[in-house]
Image (cartoon, rainbow, N blue to C red):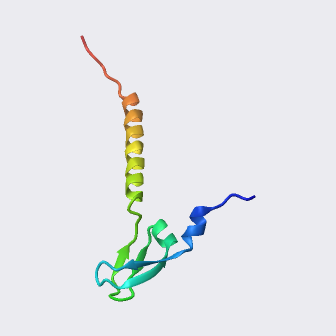
């Protein structure tokens, strides 16, 4: 049996997103949230950015880890000269 691609399966589902400005419901695919795209409201024509609420924590953790790695790499390059 082939493996299930749950992310791919859910990406095509339609969801309703309420515009934060005019409160009109806008129908989008989950994929639009997953790729953090921008949409234009069908009611007020205001553009707003979509993002996963939980993804911000994942993204922040990834950035912190990257910074830690960079600091470790830089600290290995530091040479201290002590004159007596």
Camera sees residue 6:
yes
Indicate the quadrant containing the N terminus: top left, top right, bottom left or bottom right. bottom right
Q: Quadrant of residue 76?
A: top left
Decide if residue 41 is on the left or right side of residue 12.
Answer: left
Reply above or below: 74 against 83.
below
Residue displayed at 39% across by 82% down: 40
Q: Position of residue 50 (x, y in %)?
A: 40, 70
Q: Quadrant of residue 21?
A: bottom left
Reply above or below: 8 against 46.
above
Residue displayed at 39% across by 48% down: 61
Residue displayed at 39% across by 33% down: 72
Give the residue at the far top of this rendering. 84
Say which of 55 and 77 sits in front: 55
Residue displayed at 50% across by 71% down: 30
Give the residue at the far left of this rendering. 84
Q: Position of residue 67 (x, y in %)?
A: 38, 43
Decide if residue 60 is on the left or right side of residue 4.
Answer: left
Reply above or below: 55 against 51.
above
Say which of 84 and 66 sits in front: 66
Give the residue at the far front of this rendering. 1
Numbered disc total:
0
Give the residue at the far right of this rendering. 1
Q: Position of residue 39 (x, y in %)?
A: 41, 78
Indicate the quadrant containing the C terminus: top left, top right, bottom left or bottom right. top left
Camera sees residue 35:
no
Q: Position of residue 36 (x, y in %)?
A: 44, 67
Q: Quadrant of residue 78?
A: top left
């Amino acid at each position: 049996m082939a493996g299930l691609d749950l992310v791919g399966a859910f990406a095509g589902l339609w969801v309703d997103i309420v515009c934060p400005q005019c409160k009109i419901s806008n129908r989008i695919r989950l994929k639009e949230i997953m790729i953090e795209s921008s949409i234009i409201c069908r009611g007020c024509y205001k553009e707003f950015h979509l993002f996963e609420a939980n993804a911000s924590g994942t993204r922040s953790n990834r950035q912190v880890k990257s910074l830690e790695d960079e600091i470790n790499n830089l600290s290995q390059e530091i040479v201290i000269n002590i004159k007596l």
